[in-house]
Amino acid sequence: MKVLSFDTSSKALSVALLENEKCLAAMTLNIKKNHSISLMPTIDFLMQSVNLTPQDLDRIVVAEGPGSYTGLRVAVATAKTLAYALGIDLVGVSSLKSLALSGAYEGLTVSIMDARRHNVYVGFYENGRAVEADRHASFQDVLEHLQGRQKLTFVGEVAAFREEILQNFPQAQVLEVLPSAVEIGKVGQYLPAVDVNAFVPKYLKRVEAEENWLKTHEDSDSSYIKRV
């Protein structure tokens, strides 16, 4: 099985091509850049580097969220377009799982993505498997939730939280790691394909504009989004 996988849910862009679990080519860029401009050229470059054509692909695997709203829309729209045009499978994998799979960690792995205002997107993983649902939460709530736990490894966008983590859990590992398209590509080969037309990003939190709108429309249907 030949797989194209990519993650643009954060500042970093990660793209990989795999044949079964063998990585044929991969690239990760950790610079602030417009993913809508850089994603397809990166895919094209890797495809040409290993002499593959789009018709050689069997499956697209994409980081489905949570993360940057813009980054997720770029990734999911690209993944859906490619899967539909090529008539191949599409699979979504949690962006937080992508971080948890960055290494073999003992105990509980806590994947963190900075959601601003001292909030985070957080996932809890053991041996690469989620033990709780990914969610959006204040970082203080995360620390309180973990009290009493031993052998903790915090991974991902942890730089802003390092001091608080070590104050509460002096023995914890705190590792700033990047998403891995290679790892989600491996995992995605064993997951069921999704309905391409129905597939949407998993934001875990409403966009700020929608939250502000709902504050002044408390009696409205919370699922309503006005089209303009």
Image (tube, rainbow, N blue to C red):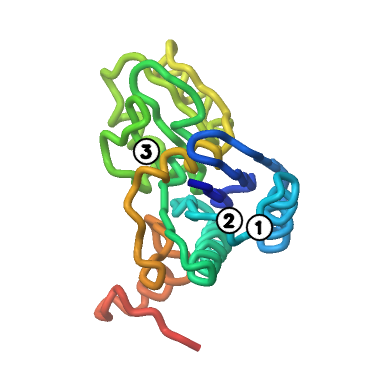
Closer to viewer: mark 3 or mark 1:
1
Where does the image place residue 133, in percent across and percent down from the top left? 28, 43
Q: Residue at x 32, y 26 (%)?
A: 126
The residue wearing badge 2 is 56
In screen coordinates, is 6 left or right of 52? left
In screen coordinates, is 202 left or right of 42? left
The residue wearing badge 1 is 53
Q: Residue at x 45, y 23 (%)?
A: 165
The residue wearing badge 3 is 123
Closer to viewer: mark 2 or mark 3:
2
Whether residues under marks 2 and 3 lie with C-beta atoms below 8 angstroms apart, the answer is no
Position of residue 120 relative to residue 227, above or below, is: above
For the residue pair 200 and 146, the one nearer the viewer reads as 200
In the image, what residue type sits under mark 3? Gly
For the residue pair 180 and 10, the one nearer the viewer reads as 180
Q: Secondary structure at mark 1?
A: loop
Where does the image place residue 101, in percent across and percent down from the top left? 46, 31
In the image, what residue type sits under mark 1? Thr
Outermost residue, bottom side:
228
Q: Secondary structure at mark 2?
A: helix
Q: Residues within 10 Å of mark 3 (few under 14, many from 20)?
A: many
Q: How much space separates mark 2 and mark 1, taking CA atoms?
A: 5 Å
Whether residues under marks 2 and 1 lie with C-beta atoms below 8 angstroms apart, the answer is yes
Q: Secondary structure at mark 3?
A: strand
Q: How much space separates mark 2 and mark 3, taking CA atoms?
A: 34 Å
In the image, what residue type sits under mark 2? Asp
For the residue pair 160 and 189, the one nearer the viewer reads as 189
